[in-house]
Image (cartoon, rainbow, N blue to C red):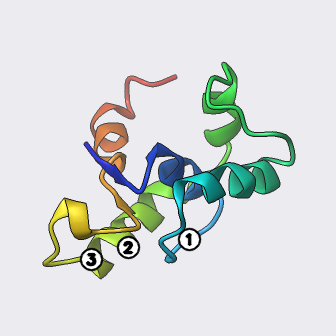
């Protein structure tokens, strides 16, 4: 399971389809805008805020297709975090 440039890409994909490879530092501002509140990496309620959105898996798959033929380290933005959620979605409440 990997996410380039960072795990915050997976969070952003819950809201929008992001095709630009932005620096890690820009993800905090983008998530703050999308959440409507300051993004905090250690937010205990982040999962609840994100589960209300349902496009992340669809958007992540589109990014994987767009980066087809590239190694994970050269695929940015791209994430395979969706594979975890597809595998365990029936167990997550």
User: Of the residues under marks 1 and 2, which one precedes in the sequence?
Assistant: 1
Q: Quadrant of residue 4?
A: bottom left
Q: Position of residue 67 (x, y in %)?
A: 27, 76
Q: Quadrant of residue 40?
A: top right
Is residue 6 shown left or right of residue 22? Answer: left
Local packing at callout 2 (Cα closer than 10 Å; few below 14, some 14-19, many 20+) is some
> Which residue occupies 50% across, 56% down?
56
Is residue 84 shown left or right of residue 77? Answer: left
Q: Are marks 1 and 2 in contact (CB under 8 Å)?
A: yes
Q: Position of residue 69 (x, y in %)?
A: 13, 78
> Which residue occupies 36% across, 68% down?
76
Q: Position of residue 66 (x, y in %)?
A: 31, 80
* Of residues 80 and 30, the one drawn nearer to the viewer in this rendering: 30
On screen, residue 60 above or below 31: below
> Which residue occupies 66% across, 19% down?
44
From the viewer's perspective, is the residue at label 2 or at label 3 nearer? 3
User: Of the residues under marks 3 and 1, which one precedes in the sequence?
Assistant: 1
User: Of the residues under marks 2 and 3, which one precedes in the sequence?
Assistant: 2
Q: Secondary structure at mark 3?
A: loop
Residue indicated by mark 2: 62
> Which residue occupies 65% across, 59% down?
15
Residue indicated by mark 3: 67
Give the distance between the C-alpha atoms of the residues marked 2 and 3, in whole angstroms. Answer: 9 Å
Residue indicated by mark 1: 17
Q: Quadrant of residue 30?
A: bottom right
Q: Are marks 2 and 3 in contact (CB under 8 Å)?
A: no
On screen, residue 52 above or below 63: above
Is residue 76 shown left or right of residue 68? Answer: right
Q: Which quadrant is the N terminus positioned in?
A: top left
């Amino acid at each position: 399971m990997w996410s380039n440039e960072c795990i915050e890409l997976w969070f952003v994909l819950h809201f929008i389809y992001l095709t630009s490879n932005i620096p890690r530092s820009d993800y905090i501002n983008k998530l703050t805008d999308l959440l409507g509140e300051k993004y905090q990496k250690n937010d205990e309620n982040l999962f609840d805020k994100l589960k209300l959105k349902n496009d992340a898996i669809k958007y992540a798959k589109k990014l994987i297709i767009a980066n087809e033929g590239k190694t994970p380290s050269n695929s940015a933005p791209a994430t395979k975090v969706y594979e975890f959620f597809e595998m365990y979605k029936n167990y997550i409440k």
